[in-house]
Amino acid sequence: MDFGRRDLLLGSAALLLANSSAARAVPGRKLGYAIVGLGSYGLGVIIPQFVNCTHSRLAAVVSGDRAKATRVAAEHGLGAGAIYSYADFDRIRDNPDVDIVYVCLPNAMHAEFTIRAARAGKHVLCEKPMAVSVAECEAMIAACRAADRKLMIGYRCHFEAYNLEAVRLARSGAAGKIRYVRSEHGFVQHNPAAWRLKRALSGGGSLMDMGIYSLQAARYMTGEEPVAVTARESTDRRDPRFREVEDILDWTLEFPSGAIASCQSMYSAAQNHVLLMGDAGRIELEPATRYTGNHMWVGEDGREKAVTPPPGPRVTQFAGQLDHMSESVVAGREPIVSGEEGLRDMRIVEAIYRSVREGRTIRLG
Amino acid sequence: MDFGRRDLLLGSAALLLANSSAARAVPGRKLGYAIVGLGSYGLGVIIPQFVNCTHSRLAAVVSGDRAKATRVAAEHGLGAGAIYSYADFDRIRDNPDVDIVYVCLPNAMHAEFTIRAARAGKHVLCEKPMAVSVAECEAMIAACRAADRKLMIGYRCHFEAYNLEAVRLARSGAAGKIRYVRSEHGFVQHNPAAWRLKRALSGGGSLMDMGIYSLQAARYMTGEEPVAVTARESTDRRDPRFREVEDILDWTLEFPSGAIASCQSMYSAAQNHVLLMGDAGRIELEPATRYTGNHMWVGEDGREKAVTPPPGPRVTQFAGQLDHMSESVVAGREPIVSGEEGLRDMRIVEAIYRSVREGRTIRLG
């Protein structure tokens, strides 16, 4: 596979087009989604968003908790035939009401359920990070390709109005020649029992959580693919929260243009910030990638002005993401954030961990 | 020499005490300064500050430009006997009106003039960076020690109200346990003829200029000495400004507590920013280290409040710096930012350049 400059430019253009009306020409019925995993994201964030969708609706739920699944199904007018356990999930192949499976499980379960969904003949929207290794990502892409099913990764910021406008401004030269991007995401992980702190479920610490936002933002703000990464970790292993996974990761990406991105992820301090600096000004987002309430400032250092993006056709970033997947399936087009995009991130994630282990800069292929 | 934890703690305490009245008990006359170098800093910034001083006054000027020196001397009521060239500078030993020599020359000339000043029996205040190598710093310290003269480095931020208040708040636990510091300084260096772009005069690029602020802030905000540094550079060598020195340097410092500092310096984009993040909040300065107009915000992420430092006894950071040197000389005390402090920075600077060359993490100390 070739993830070179051409792919990249196409990706950039696609991102800018994602919210355009040309990309929304989908006829007929709403596509049916099965939500796999009724945790805080699947149940708390995604399911309530179908009311904001034009082309997407809830069609089934998949959970390890039968009582919860039954309650959620009933609340959304779904019958017993729309409820699956993890064990009997493969029966979903016989449910024509489900077009797309949305995997909202812990990271280490993404590959298994994506592959099982593809084998069941369903298209897949899978949460980020795509999986816990490059090998898993490749297996997921291969399974979806073999089944001729679309695979999309839940990079919601590609449908978020402030981030879209920031990318448009960056490409339009609003900051001049891009020299430096800072991208920081973190929160204080208070709960030592969180699944995100169990390596077997998460595959890693803050990098495999908020770090994906930092990495993604560095790539879509520059519109470039990094050629090298240098990373350092800081984790207090005596802290009961951090026996298995890292707390702080700090990494520097080098891009072909000479731009540098300084990225961080952390579980011991709160931050949500993206800053792009060029030789003629800056584009700053803070908070940058929250569900709601993001802000943006653009201009020369010390003379930035708040910028509100123009209203787009999507009600929310979540609805935009769901409907883009439905549109992609109907149109037979690759989603703008495909499995290959998730694989690109995972290659960099593996290089970040390798750079920490080896204490040196890692060149990216 | 031992630059371990004990020295550090003393340094922190000294910094906090610098503006207290106890440190200001200086009797009698104002000490006389010779300003070496009548460039934009010596002439434009420092000389106008003597009017704000309690214990310091202009006593002589040293310049390669006789006409300029004569004009400046006349403007400040100094006679021909108070004017020196670089060639006849050593005659200053016979001028009892000069107590302190303030070296405001390009970096590569700091060592020579500090050593000549000490040998002429004068105390020395030398601009930062202290010199262009660790070896030079050590020679400067040795020369001042041999002559029993005080040596101070022009780290003006140790006398700047916002930075002092930020350090006080950080030590008081206002942000909780310190986990992460970001420290970025840069400006667009438009003039390809600037001495700062000539390696023979500057000793390096943005790191040897604005980078010193980033490095210093990381150290005084954490109150710790780094144990490792990992650095990357990005310079477009085809740009006529950057044939001899670097443009962007990005480096990560690791501290014994586990705190990490992500630092940058650059000549191709404008930035002046220091952010300290702890597990209970943050302390942010932007602009952080300007001559005037700095600002500070303190609090939880997303709920920061602007903080104005309490008024101190110093009229300006520059006057504070000049009078602290005078007070140190009169009291026979080491200045809070001594030659050893400059040497500490230079050791890290050399490790940063080495990390870039070798593409790996460099352990310090």
Image (cartoon, coloured by chain):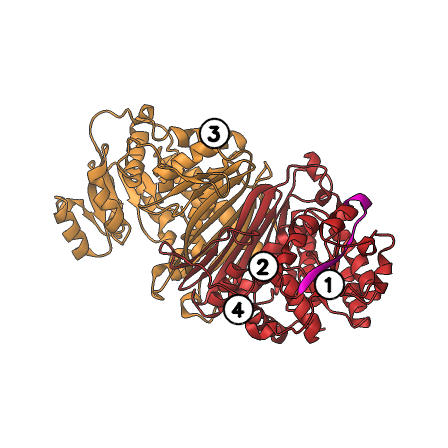
Chain colours: A orange, B red
Secondary element at image label 3 = loop
Which quadrant of the figure has residue B196? top right
Tag 1 residue:
B32
- Of labels 4 and 1, earlier in sequence is 1
Which quadrant of the figure has residue B340? bottom right
Q: Of the residues shown, which amino acid type is indicated by label 4?
A: Ser
Question: Do marks 1 and 2 share a subunit?
Answer: yes
Q: Are marks 3 and 4 in contact (CB under 8 Å)?
A: no
Q: Are marks 1 and 2 in contact (CB under 8 Å)?
A: no
- Of labels 1 and 2, earlier in sequence is 1
Q: How many marks?
A: 4
Query: Where is residue B235 drawn, in percent x and y?
Result: 65, 41
Tag 3 residue:
A172
Work out how far the residue at label 3 is from the one at label 1, CA to CA, in angstroms: 55 Å
Instruction: Tell me the mark number nearer the camera, choosing from 1 and 2.
Output: 1
| Residue A352 sits inside the magenta stretch | no
Tag 2 residue:
B317
Instruction: Tell me the mark number nearer the camera, choosing from 3 and 1.
Output: 1
Q: Of the residues shown, which amino acid type is indicated by label 3?
A: Ser
Q: Of the residues shown, which amino acid type is indicated by label 2?
A: Gln
Task: Residue at 44%, 38% (x, y): give it.
Answer: A298
Work out how far the residue at label 1 is from the one at label 2, CA to CA, in angstroms: 19 Å
Work out how far the residue at label 3 is from the one at label 4, CA to CA, in angstroms: 43 Å
Question: Do marks 3 and 4 share a subunit?
Answer: no
| Residue B66 sits inside the magenta stretch | yes
Few, some or many residues within 10 Å of mark 4 (<14, 14–19, 20+): some
Tag 4 residue:
B257
Compared across the picture, whether A298 is left or right of B330 comes to left
Front residue of B166 and A16: B166
